Amino acid sequence: MTFWVYEHRAAEKNAVVHIGSCGHCNDGYGCQRNRRGEENGRWHGPFSTSAAATKAAQATGCPTRQHGCTKVMRVRPAARA
């Protein structure tokens, strides 16, 4: 598993940690074609741990948060018959 940081430069001005397989991250390619280069934002990574990605996010100087994709999903028990 890899982790990436998206540094928003235009609207939100924050740094968000994503898992590489997240649809928003797409292993650092994002989910849309970036016509403006790095004007709106920039991907940093990959990082091998969430801690390393968080440290890189904090180093941008922007407020930092974890994207929802980084939260541990709970497995629901199977329904009883």
Image: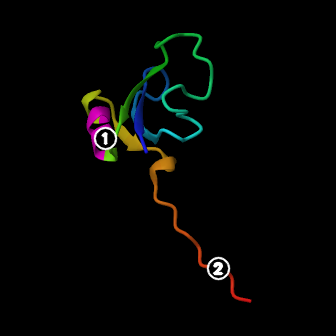
Report the Cα–Cα distance between label 1 and label 2. Answer: 35 Å
Residue 54 colored magenta?
A: yes
In the rendered image, the vertical position of residue 49 relative to residue 81, given as above or below: above
Q: In what quadrant of the picture does the N terminus appear?
A: top left
Q: Amino acid at mark 1?
A: Thr
Question: Element at badge 1?
Answer: helix
Q: x and y percent of residue 64 in the render?
A: 35, 38
Mark 2 lies on a secondary structure that is: loop
**Residue for badge 1:** 54
Residue in the picture at 45% in, 40% down? 18
Answer yes or no: is residue 16 visible: no
80 relative position to 4: left or right:
right
Q: Position of residue 81 (x, y in %)?
A: 74, 89
* Count of labels in the image: 2
Q: Residue furthest top?
A: 36
Q: Residues within 10 Å of mark 1 (few under 14, many from 20)?
A: many
Does the CB distance between marks 1 and 2 fall below 8 Å?
no
Vertical comparison of 65 with 41: above or below: below
Return the x and y of residue 6 as percentages of the image width and height.
43, 30
**Is residue 65 placed above or below 26 in the rendered structure?**
below
Residue 55 drawn at (x, y percent):
26, 38
Q: Residue at x 34, y 45 (%)?
A: 50
Q: In this rendering, does residue 57 appear at all?
A: yes
- In this figure, which residue is indicated by the disc labeled 2? 78
The chief SS type of the magenta part is: helix
Task: Find the magenta span and give its range.
Answer: 51-57
Give amino acid for label 2. Ala
